[in-house]
Image (cartoon, helix red, strand yellow):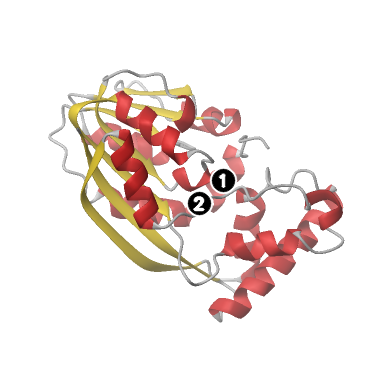
Amino acid sequence: MTNDWDGRRYDEVNGLQRWVADQALATLALDGAERVLDVGCGDGHVTAELAVRVPRGSVLGVDPSPRMLEVAAGRVRPDVPNLAFAAGSAETLTYDAEFDVVVSFNALHWVADLGLALQRIRAALRPGGTAYLQLVCEGERPSVEDVTYAVTRREPYAAWLGDVPPAYHHRHPVEIAALARAAGLEVVDERVDDLAWDFGSAEDVRAWLSVGFADWLRPLPEELRPRLVVQAADDYAAIVGSQGVVRFLQLRDRFVAI
């Protein structure tokens, strides 16, 4: 498994991610002088918006995907001198008490060892610093990732993907809170919203899945990937009752470093 998403294609289809990140940005309490770390910054769109919010501070975005960072680097301009990007994953952060705020918008549900990631996030924060973490959590309704995983277990796809583990890790909020406490992060605010995003058409949903699941489906022969995506999208539409809508449970947590 790799983490090298196609940043340019992602920039074309990530309206959903920007929508949920914008909702979270509206809740951030910033005075403009903080040093901020954005974990799993992706194409850097939201990271650049954060830099505008802290004109007397700075923002560093980290992501494991070279192609994402290639797009993100294009957002560094002379009029945004407090913005920078670096390669890195949540589980391998090496910062030591360097940031006032850590944010992560819908990246941590792709992380296999969330406990380790939260430890590294805590280590990056100064004592009393704040972490705003947003991720998709587990619920009773099957997610689009659950449905896609089930399709990978069918033939003809199972011949290539039967031993490939899920790329995602949806956890219950109680489990996430326990891992955070063990890492030295105290929950001070938590909410779970059942959200829906209308892509507008089945074709747009398939385009989004093709980008987001590209690395996960990489072992599959290229000619079979569109077929699997169509099957997953159709199966998921039968669950949510719409060809163009994706629904998910959005967990938003605010932690303080203790």
Work out whether 194 lies above or below 95: below
Query: For the point 69% across and 66% down, which residue is it?
Result: 232
Q: Secondary structure at mark 2?
A: loop
The tag on residue 74 is none
Q: What amino acid is at disc 2?
A: Asn
State the image coordinates of residue 11 (x, y, percent, origin top left). 53, 44
Q: Is residue 136 above or below residue 100?
A: below
Asked if residue 80 can be seen in this view, the reply is no
Q: Which three-letter amino acid code belongs to the residue tagged 1?
A: Tyr
The residue that mark 1 highlights is 10
Location of mark 2 (residue): 14
Residue 89 falls left or right of residue 52: right
- Please name whichever residue, 66 or 168, is drawn nearer the observer in this view of the structure: 168
Query: Looking at the picture, how far across and down is residue 76, in whole percent?
Result: 40, 25
Q: Quarter-wise, where is residue 114 in the image?
A: top left
Task: Quarter of the image for the N terminus: give it.
Answer: top right
Q: Is residue 126 above or below residue 193?
A: above
Q: Where in the figure is residue 70, as x and y percent of width and height?
A: 55, 28
- Is residue 38 rendered to the left or right of residue 244? left
